[in-house]
Image: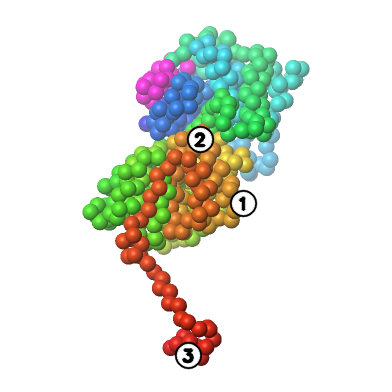
Amino acid sequence: MNQPPCTPNNTAHIWAKSPLPGENTGQTLTEHTWQVLSRLHDFAALRSDLPQKVGQPRLWQILFWAAFLHDFGKTAQGFQKSLRRSAGASQRGATRRWNYRHEALSLAFLPWLEADFSAGERVFLAAAIVTHHKDLAELEKYLEPEGESLPLMLSELHPRDVNALHGWLTECSPAWLDALQAYPLGISLPAFAAPGALATPAQIRRSLRGVQKLHREWEELLYDSPNPLAEADVPRLGILLRGLLVQADHLASSGFGSPPALHIRAEEMLQAANIPEEGLRSHQREAALTEGSAMLSAPTGSGKTEAALLWAARQNPPRLFYTLPYQASMNAMYDRLQTIFPGKVGLLHGRAALSLYQRLMEQEYSAEDAAKTARTLRNQAGLSYFPVRVFSPYQMLKVAFQLKGYEALLADFHHAAFIFDEIHAYEPKRLALILETMRFLREHYAARFFVMSATLPKPVREMLQETLQTYANLGASPQTYAQFRRHELRLLDGDLLDEPHLEQIVR
């Protein structure tokens, strides 16, 4: 459903986004919020049991209402004026910006619904709202007791608009919950306070201090703990909340709509790959029956990829990531998986846009359309749109180094399945980083791994065993190895440079 089932009164003039090129009106706050909640519902449907698995039964309740309020601060008159000034700004030169953060002002609306949330849940609500754009460090000026920013922002909320937002919550949210099938996910209507119950500057600062404490706990956990990967799920939950809301917000802003669902069925996969079930080799059959992580050793050309996909079908994951070391092999695997999962595969590497552009040009696209479509496909892959993604393990290392957007990546890695091909190809330091990231995702995000190789050196195998802990050890049969033996070695007595040997080599 692209449009909300209930449109609130007196809110059409409140924009969330400035107009697109060639348009005169921006996207309204209600339209954007509906799209964010719709994308959040898509993510919740992927992992409906996530609240129980992370130990927060009201996870979707917290996220839904955080998403509902996350942009309410954009109602400020100064922010609305800046959106309207930005329309056509390219013709008029630079335009004056609104020098405040709407996320901080959105916290002013928390008292409308926080009576139904515990003290700990209120911190999560505030954390998801106030960090959905910027890191908390960039909002510290709003913590100053004598600062003027919060009072000035609150003064920009017109009573008419405040009443309109409150009417939106009370009158339309029941219909929105119904349309989004939110009740089965544990999302319910809170008891709304009166419209005049906006937070004071002191109350907003108190909310910010709670979020600040949560983030400090995470930093202490990460940098000071002797075993940072095994403790304190409370701050980790805050990171998950931010990641899910950022994912929903960015995907909603992109206008791409609902991401396609991933249904890996063994029968359909074999049919797409043109492999009869009776023709499966023993290691492929074993993979199809394996639950949890696995390691496979099998010769090149013996169907390791099919074995990995049969394993993935058994896991029934919300997301599947196929990792390879080289761009050429990633491009080839992208083409291969597109035939099995058409329209559901994303490609992520440094030259992905160029690779996609070249493929589109081969399909008789015009250069302009090919460039535009390639950029769209690359952006979709980066926005967690595609349920199957081909990338290098270095994309995963963004999590280890906490690069921008790592929280959204972590949210997407929850309960995902990873296929690692040619893992022996990495130099030792990078391999160590990859293995530790795998360990972290296995321990805290229930990720499962299928590691396969034709050649797996003993030291690498031992490190993988330590990383995976519990796994199935799969291997091709002796008959398969004999069938795919590609090299023959003949040893001759004597010196390589003996004249008879040289003559034989020449012949």
Q: Residue furthest left?
A: 278
Q: What amino acid type should be assigned to the residue bearing mark 2?
A: Glu
Q: What secondary structure characterizes most of the magenta part? A: helix
Query: Distance of mark 3 from mark 1, alpha carbons?
Result: 47 Å
Q: Nearer the viewer, residue 85 or 435?
A: 435
Q: How many marks?
A: 3
Q: Which residues are magenta?
A: 169-188
Name the residue tied to disc 1: 429
In the image, which is nearer the foreground, mark 2 or mark 3?
3
Query: Looking at the rendering, which quadrant does residue 127 occupy?
Result: top right
Residue at the spot 39% in from the left edge and 57% down from the top edge: 298
Residue at the spot 56% in from the left edge and 24% down from the top edge: 234
Relative height, residue 110 to residue 342 (above, below): above
Name the residue tied to disc 2: 443
Q: Does 174 appear in magenta?
A: yes
Name the residue tied to disc 3: 500
Q: Which mark is residue 305?
A: none
Q: Quadrant of the N terminus?
A: top left
